[in-house]
Amino acid sequence: MEYHSFAKDCIDELKVLQEKFNKDYDLDSYANWFYDQATGLLTFSSNEPELNFKYFEVGSFSHKSDTWMWSWHNENTSENAKVAAKQIKDFGERCGFTKLTNGCFEIDEFEAWEFVAIAAKVINGIGAYRPVNDNGLKIFLVITEHVDNETAKNIKNKYIECSDHEYRRVAFVCQHLNFATRVGFEESFETLEGMELSEEDDFQAWCDQCESIRVLEDGWNHNTMKFAKLRVVCEACYFKMKELNLGSV
């Protein structure tokens, strides 16, 4: 497979895809847009109702330097927003397409759209969107699916604003877990930062004291919950506490 002919085919397919996407959702009729790396949602609004989509960030283009950066190469892009873009890199490695595997390099904006078209092809996107951030940097997104407002609300409710880590997923810890003292770390299931969770699951952890009482009481009940006094923290704070308690001394 030759890169330039493949990229041209992807551009032609994206034009058709984008025409259908704009016809189906009429994005120009909405006054406001907002994309959130934490939730992975792109939201359009005027009044009610909102229009929500799941998306991933393909990369960014700077007119100041005529430079493209893939999101998987950008340390400032959250893992949630760029995880799908890593599939583009894997695809490029399999096909020998170096433009899909180099993290940052000089291009023109048309090539940026080629990358978006390729990403939409590989990931089966339903459309693309290009917001501009406060620094004039153009961010290229591939939209993967429409999300009904109730589902979008449930997704957004699973996030909390943290003074140290901005918006992250909600996590629950007992009152004894902290950032300075090792008190043990028990979880409802084995966790990794950034992992996908089902709608029913949350990050939950408690200390050794809470675990002793939980075992003594044969599970969670009024007494164990009263002793634990679970509190809400963000996902990043949760894993900072986990690292303190389970990391090497």
Image (cartoon, grey):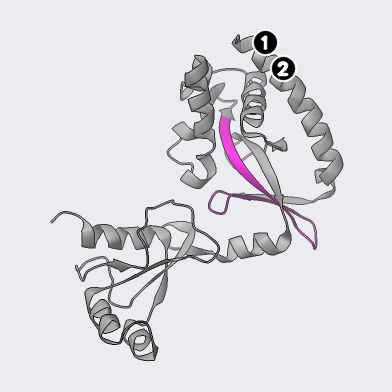
Mark 2 residue crowding within 10 angstroms, few (<14) / some (14–19) / many (20+): some
Q: Is residue 102 visible?
A: yes
Q: Residue at x 47, y 24 (%)?
A: 104
Give above or below for 76 relative to 243: above
Most foreground residue, 224 or 167: 224
Q: Quadrant of the N terminus?
A: top right
Residue 21 is tagged as none
Q: Secondary structure at mark 2?
A: helix
Q: Position of residue 139 (x, y in %)?
A: 61, 36
Q: Which residues are magenta?
A: 36-60
Residue 181, given in percent of the width and then of the height, sits at: 19, 69
Q: Nearer the viewer, residue 232 or 32?
A: 232
Image point (29%, 63%), residue name: 241
User: Alpha-carbon distance for marks 1 and 2?
Assistant: 6 Å
Residue 170 forms part of the magenta stretch:
no
Relative to 135, say whether 175 is above or below: below
**Residue at point 62%, 34% (across, down):** 123
Find disc 1 in the rendering and name its residue: 5
Q: What label sits on residue 9 in the rendered view?
A: 2
The answer to the question of whether label 1 and label 2 lie on touching residues, with beta carbons closer than 8 A, is yes
Q: Is residue 47 left or right of residue 247?
A: right
